[in-house]
Image: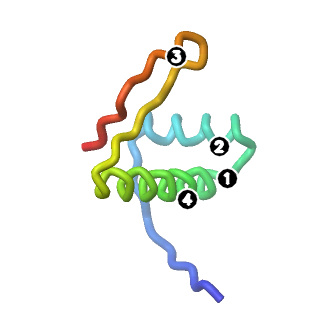
Amino acid sequence: MMTKKTMTLNLTDAEMSALERLAEAKDLTKTSILRQALRLYQLIDSRLAQGEKVFVENSLTKEKAELAIL
């Protein structure tokens, strides 16, 4: 069984508003949104560490843009 730990997260008003909008739009809790964001960041970081590039593509124009992660 996985043990869970609690943390305090301080967000700006803009960050909290963005989190609340995402949670409402996806019908998820704020915690679920943050967990998904962490998993996505881990995936992207892992791919970049392997020397890969990450792109997004416009489905209409097929224009691609590389994601730059700092």
Q: Amino acid at mark 4?
A: Arg
Q: Nearer the viewer, mark 3 or mark 1?
A: 3
**Contact (Cβ within 8 Å) of mark 4 with mark 2:** no
Element class at badge 3: loop
Residue at the spot of label 4: 35
Q: Residue at x 45, y 70 (%)?
A: 7
Q: CA distance from mark 2 to mark 1?
A: 6 Å
* First of labels 2, 1 by sequence position: 2
Q: Which residue is mark 3?
A: 62
> Given this view, does label 1 or label 4 mark the residue nearer the observer?
4
Please rate how many residues cluster around mark 3, counting C-alpha atoms within 10 Å: few if below 14, some from 14 to 19, many from 20.
few
Mark 2 packing: few (<14 Cα in 10 Å), some, or many (20+)? some
Label at residue 19: none
From the viewer's perspective, is 27 left or right of 40? Answer: right
Q: Residue at x 51, y 78 (%)?
A: 5
- Marks 2/1 in contact by CB < 8 Å: the verdict is yes
Measured in 3D between alpha carbons, the distance from the residue under mark 1 to the one under mark 4, in whole angstroms, is 10 Å
Q: Residues within 10 Å of mark 4 (few under 14, many from 20)?
A: few
Q: Is residue 20 above or below residue 31?
A: above
Tell which circle, 3 or 4, labels the residue nearer the N-terminal end: 4
Q: Cα distance, mark 3 to mark 2?
A: 29 Å
> Image quadrant for the C terminus?
top left
Q: Which residue is mark 2?
A: 23
Residue nearest the observer in this picture, 43 or 29: 43
Nearest the camera: 56 or 14?
A: 56
Label 3 vs label 1: CA separation?
33 Å
Q: In what element is the residue under mark 4?
A: helix
| Mark closest to the chain's N terminus, 3 or 1 | 1
In this figure, which residue is indicated by the disc labeled 1? 29
Q: Secondary structure at mark 2?
A: helix
Residue drawn at the location 38% of the way across and 24% of the way down: 65
Q: Amino acid at mark 3?
A: Lys
